[in-house]
Amino acid sequence: MRFTIARRGWVVAAAVMAGAVMPATAQQTGMSPLDLSNPAASRQDANLRSFPVPPTVTPLERLPVGKLKLPAGFKAEVWSHGHPGARTMVMGDKGTLFMGTRLIGRVYAITTKDGKRESKVLLQGLTQPNGLAFRNGALYVFAINRVFRYDNIEDKLDNPGDPVELTDKFNLPDTVHHGWKYVEFGPDGKLYVPTGVNCNICEVNPGIHGQIRRYNADGSGMEIIARGVRNTVGFDWHPASKELWFTDNGRDWAGNEGPQDELNRVAKGMDGANFGFPYCHANGIADIDIRRPNPCAGVVMPAALLGPHSAGLGIKFYTGTMFPKTYQNAAFIARRGSWNREKKFGYDVVVARTQANGTATIEPFMTGLLDEAKNEFAGRPTYVLQLKDGSLLVSDEQNGAIYRITYAAPKGGKN
Amino acid sequence: MTAVVALQRYGVLAVGVIAMVLAANSTGAQTMPIAERIAQCGSCHGEDGNSRLPDVPSLAGQPAFFVMNQLFLMREGVRRIEVMTPIVKELTDGDLDALSAHYAQLAPKASDETIDPAMVKQGDALAQKLRCASCHLLTLAGQDQMPRLARQRVDYLFSTMKAMRDNQRPGTDTQMSSIVAGLSDADLTALAHYSASR
């Protein structure tokens, strides 16, 4: 049962080499057109609207941890709860888990005492502080265009004091739509920061929006690493190749079937490559509203498709020893789940197994939050984080909780 | 059983009263009684929840989640409105629930502003293009986190959409900023007249 998604046939090993340039004519063959079978799907329809995130606490007994389904040997438990709007997670050197949010505007600090979690509101009143990074004892907070650095934060969780403000140094656009950030330090020590497009589908100024940038930690030395990126709020580096892999959310209001969300790779030597927005989506689909000749010319195709409207957010490559060896260097991706789709889709965690040629295959990992028969969801996974012991944390924005996934070899089985 | 009978006899009015009583009992803290609180809100937002003051929104018939969520975000300091700040600071979670339940069951009435039929027609066409009804419903009565627009004040609708367009309105789904991006003030005025007329 837990592999029903795979049988539906969306699991796709991308047929096109990532990093290769797409021939201009290739979107004519082997590509699915935008689904226009249901005209209502691109018009006004109350079945295609977004869902509220409760700002209030979901009680422990109402958390859907009992519904979670995992492969044999894996187990899920509640690791922390009572922090509404739970999204991004970064770990401090001294064991504090910092958590970013969107609408509720909070940053939480979650500490462990005697094996129990205590969460407190560290910062509040910010505009969409989804972007958190930790380096040399300092917490970096990105709230749209505002950037703050809290030095030695783990020594002053009760009173973080005034931060160093780096807003002017980073000089990010102040547009809010797709302006909430995922940020992370790369293996090169640079801070990677995306600038999502401030629309569903439109022409943007490519000098400002639709990029992944990298900066020195003080906001100097900006370089553009990727262009034509609609809205990435999750990326990580492959442990062996050190190449950047990122999730990207496809456009809405173009039908139930897509264009599908993407898993992309910035191949070595391809810094600054174009990933297609707004002219070319998914595996080479021309946009229906913003047209130009040869829309996919020069566009890097995705390593894999992540499903229609599935909202792949957080991604982390697994490097621990707790899980079976087959998960080494595989990536876990949290899919928040669809809104602009009549039949709900996603609301799970998948595994991306990447290949040396830059493609990837996607398979289910944590399911059970989506009731397909009722077309209802019980939770929305947003980010993943590997703990030192090799277990995996998954944040659930809808319920303000974090689940911990552990593995123990089944009796008689082999790891 | 008593509650059910009361609901049948007094209709929606009873819902608000029961919610108020429940909320008042559950908080226990030394706070302003909810009836006083409602009177305080009413001095600007209208006793019946229909505002007669420029740029002050009507709350009658707003979805309960919407009012609760916005009061919550004001209390958090995410959405900052100077005149509201000292008031929302005092609100307990019980107050948020009681106030939102109270306003959800009040009847929205048309604003006393002049509504221009030509603007309504223009706004209607634009609203269809922008798919307003997908979230706010065809009646524009709103749902969940998305507010009622029908019978809202024209001036408030305009200034709110303008703030969203100009990135001055935290505490809302950012989709609104993307939807009104690039619209002229005249477009927003037309949308405001159309919405208020519904």
Image (cartoon, coloured by chain):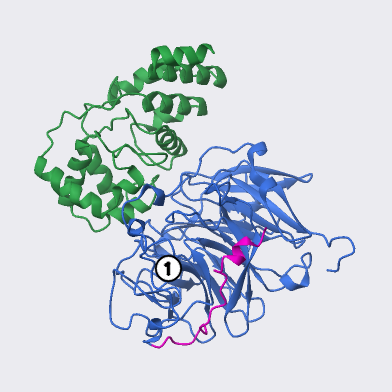
Q: Please determine whether, in this image, residue B44 is positioned above or below residue B71.
A: above
Res B30 seen here: yes
Quadrant of the drawing holding the N terminus of chain A? bottom right
> According to the rendering, which colour does chain B have?
green
Quadrant hosting residue A289: bottom left
Part of the protein shown in magenta: A1-23
Residue A369 highlighted magenta (yes or no): no
Res A175 seen here: no
Q: Can you identify the residue that label 1 sits on? A: A259
Q: Horizontal and vertical percent for residue B78?
A: 43, 43
Which residue is depicted at the point 59% across and 45% down?
Answer: A400
Which residue is depicted at the point 47% across and 12% down?
Answer: B5
- Between A391 and A167, the one lying in front of the other is A391
The chain carrying label 1 is A
Which residue is depicted at the point 51% across and 87% down?
Answer: A269
Name the magenta segment's main secondary structure. loop
Q: Horizontal and vertical percent for residue A345?
A: 52, 57
Left of B17 or right of it: where is A40? Answer: left
Q: Please determine whether, in this image, residue B20 is positioned above or below residue A377.
A: above
Q: Horizontal and vertical percent for residue A4?
A: 62, 61
Quadrant of the drawing holding the C terminus of chain A? bottom right
Left of B56 or right of it: where is A283? Answer: right
The amino acid beneath tag 1 is Pro
Q: Horizontal and vertical percent for residue A113?
A: 75, 44
Left of A15 or right of it: where is B197? Answer: left
